[in-house]
Amino acid sequence: MRKMILASSNPHKLREFREILEPLGWEVISQKDAGIDVDPEENGSTFAENSAIKARAVYEIARTAVIADDSGLEVDALGGEPGVYSARYGGTRDDKAHNALVLDKLRSVPDEKRTARFVAAITYIDESGKESSFIGKFEGRIGYEERGKNGFGYDPIFMVGDISSAELSPDEKNAVSHRGKALRALAEYLSADKEENRC
Ligand code: IMP
């Protein structure tokens, strides 16, 4: 099995990456389990830049295959905010406070202008240092109150038709989500790579 390091120690992300990449013959280990203690400043202006910053920091130390992701919510009526600041929007890391802030800022915004999307970028760096990026988008609208108990972050206020993404089951969300799409694009790339490298 080929090994790659996930430039994150988030167990939720580790599980999602393993589910898709292990069947392709990849063992995915967390940065922590690889003994790498690095936490670079995510000062890029796009999700792709930030995922590349995280992947490069780990690659510089490990010199082996690495993947990293970065994601967040873009609200059109807020000019794309919270964007790359999604995890620390309004100067806090509290999900409830993030959701309250977005709902408050959109108080007088009509339905048709409440369009939004989740975006996920994944950067893969292979053993030789070659970088590839993948983007996935998940379109929806901002609702008027929190709904649902599944998911995390902005899911309770992100509406997909009549329900929020916190009302989707994990499988239903994976099938349509930004991270699911970016991960499947990466998986497709790695499968093609595997074919190319066959003796
Ligand atoms: P990061 O990718 O770990 O930097 O997380 C970015 C932030 O974006 C998270 O803390 C969440 O607030 C938000 N986010 C990213 N993906 C999702 C999602 O699928 N649902 C809800 N919130 C998300």
Image (cartoon, rainbow, N blue to C red):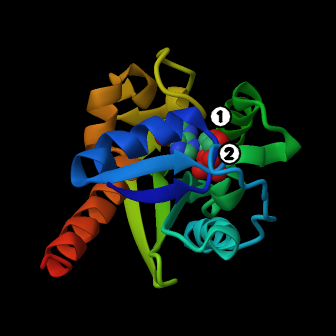
Foreground tag (2 vs 1): 2
Which residue is labeled 1 in the image? Answer: 103
Residue 84 vs residue 119: left or right?
Answer: right
Q: CA distance from mark 2 to mark 1?
A: 36 Å
Q: Position of residue 113 (x, y in %)?
A: 48, 51
Which residue is labeled 2 in the image? Answer: 32
Residue 106 position (above or below residue 155): below
Residue at image position (18%, 73%) is: 192
- In what element is the residue under mark 1? helix
| Residue toward you, 29 or 157 | 29
Q: Which mark is residue 142?
A: none
Residue at image position (34%, 24%) is: 168
Residue at image position (59%, 74%) is: 63
Quadrant assignment for ligand 1: top right
Residue at image position (28%, 29%) is: 171
**Three-letter amino acid code of the residue under disc 2:** Lys
In the rendered structure, which disc, 2 or 1, sits on the residue that comes first in sequence? Answer: 2
Residue 83 vs residue 175: left or right?
Answer: right
Quadrant in which the C terminus is drawn: bottom left
- In what element is the residue under mark 2? loop
Residue 184 position (above or below residue 180): below
Q: Position of residue 75 (x, y in %)?
A: 56, 53
